[in-house]
Image (tube, rainbow, N blue to C red):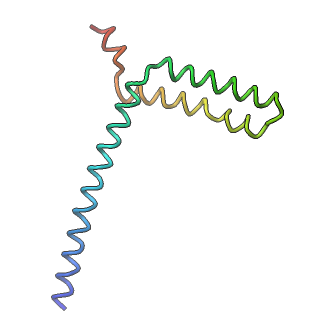
Amino acid sequence: MQEQAQRVQEQAGRAGQQAQQMGRQMAERGAGMFQFLEEVPTTVYYMLVIGSIIVSAALQFSGRQRAGIFVGLWPPTFATLALLAKLLRPSQEARQMAS
């Protein structure tokens, strides 16, 4: 009985270590993602928003309404990514203006 309890504790300890290691790896990847978002200039996000609106309208007028709706859902996503980049990481543009 005690041997089983020890095995279970050992397995739980290994599982906890694996979970911690996975958490560290995910945190590193997340930091890399935010760094990537920060490096993209703001104008790129705005161009993506405007471009997807134009493509969506063109698809709607060409009769491909489902594709137009699908592409029409992209602008809020791009705008949200721009806001995320600005809110979570102070931009290099703001740092340069402050200097």
Q: Residue at x 31, y 14 (%)?
A: 95
Going by the image, does 50 lie left or right of 32? Answer: right
In this picture, is 24 found above or below 10? above
In the rendering, at what x and y percent does residue 30 appear? 35, 41
Residue 83 x %, y %: 47, 27
Q: Residue at x 75, y 26 (%)?
A: 57
Residue 79 position in % (x across, y down): 54, 27
Going by the picture, which residue comes out furthest to the bottom?
1
Q: Quadrant of the C terminus?
A: top left
For the point 33% across and 43% down, which residue is it? 29
Q: Residue at x 37, y 30 (%)?
A: 88
Indicate the quadrant where residue 69 lies: top right
Q: Is residue 42 left or right of residue 69?
A: left
Q: Is residue 47 left or right of residue 41?
A: right
Q: Does 4 sit above or below residue 93? A: below
Quadrant of residue 96 within the rendered picture: top left
- The mark tally for this picture is 0
Position of the N terminus by quadrant:
bottom left
- From the top left corner, tell me how far across and down residue 59 is, in percent: 76, 31
Vertical position of residue 81 compared to residue 54: above or below: below
